[in-house]
Image (tube, grey):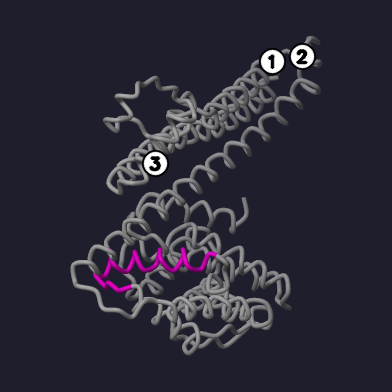
Amino acid sequence: MNILDKAKVYVENLFKDKLSSVYFYHNFIHTTSAVNKAEEIIKHSDISEADREKVILAIWFHDVGFTDCNAEGHEKRSAEIMKEFLQKENYPQAYIDDVYQLILSTEKCYQPKNLSEKIIKDADFSHFASPTYHDISEALRKEWELTGGTCFSNEEWDKLNVDFLKNKHRYFTNYAQENWEPLKMKNVKKIEKKLNKEDKQNKDDSDKKDSKSDRSVDTLFRVTLNNHTRLSDIADSKANILLSVNAIIISVCLSVLVPKLDTPKNVHLIIPTFLLLLSSVLTIVFAILSTKPNVTKTHFTQEDVAKRKVNLLFFGNFHQMLFDDFHSAMRDLLKDRDYIYDSMIKDLYFLGKVLDRKYKLLSTTYTIFMAGIIISVLAFAYAFLTL
């Protein structure tokens, strides 16, 4: 495993174990997106492979400081965590210093001095040109509300975004200026159009408070459900990797090793081969279990629907209903906001239960795979030494 893969695994585990759930924006999803955008810029830039590695390393670590401190000074804390990681990997101090400086260059007001710093700055703010900028912006808004107590009305937030995007931010690399700047300005125009169309009529304080609360709750559900879905995709991707690797191992064993075991001179290889096959089969079984759909089939009555005991947002509940009954129940649901929130809470809870089971099985799968490979290699070595 190369240093970038090690960094990815390290950062993913660090966010999973230590990052507070209130960080809707500064999390592993944002970090992964920034890495992908940096790779996109690098493909269109004249940069050495050594500098590319330093840039990608810096981006993987640039927000890990949020795991044990707030926004203030997180860049320095992120750099310190990176430093500890690379020192354990026995990297030279000069290399560590370069990556350290790249992380510090992600400070909001810092002006980049070289191409590497320009790439990491642009990648960190690449979401300004994203078609989903509104949702990403709302995630950051919610994070600020929960971590710093800073609350904005819709109008205040939109004006703050327009001012920052137009007057305080700019892209530095040629690629970002040519390809992302026009997309960023489209997002600015969307916000300005929204501001121009907003009703200027004053509302009483209670109405404003209720509206703001509803929007915050809507954003909370949308971002959290989206994050849960992405985590599920990540788990399935990891399981698929293990399935492919172990399928290849089994195929090689059956075609190369097993046919040779019936000769007396290869008797010593029977047990190591069996151990390798056994570990691969167990790994495949647990990987399949982690990705296997677990759909609950619930039987209920119209009285259960009337008493709101049924989650109409989950297909495992409503797929047995007649269309007319489902249509009627959904219209009742849409009329009652509390009923909607109750259904979304149930959906979020059970999705979390599924993720818990999936990641526990995936953790067991990796443990089996790692232990099986180690034991098999040791068994083969012992078999040859005692031959």
Real-space Cα separation, disc 3 to disc 1, in angstroms: 65 Å
The numbered disc on residue 270 is 1
Q: Which of the numbered marks, if any, corresponds to residue 261?
A: 2
| Circle 2 SS class | loop
N-terminal label among 2 and 1: 2
Which picture quadrant has residue 251? top right
SS type, badge 3: helix
**Mark 3 surroundings within 10 Å by alpha-carbon count, few (fewer than 14), some (14 through 19), many (20 or more):** few
Cβ–Cβ below 8 Å for labels 2 and 1? yes
Which stretch is magenta? 132-153
The picture places residue 315, in percent across and down from the top left corner, at: 48, 32
- Residue ID for mark 3: 331
**In the image, residue 241 lies at what x, y percent?**
63, 39
Among the two numbered marks 3 and 2 on one chain, the one whose residue lies closer to the N terminus:
2
Give the mark, 3 or 1, whose residue is nearer the N terminus.
Answer: 1
Magenta segment: does it hold 156? no
Is 297 left, or right, of 46 in this rendering? left
The amino acid sitting under disc 3 is Arg
Q: Nearer the viewer, residue 177 or 8?
A: 177
**Is disc 3 in contact with disc 2, using a CB cutoff of under 8 Å?**
no
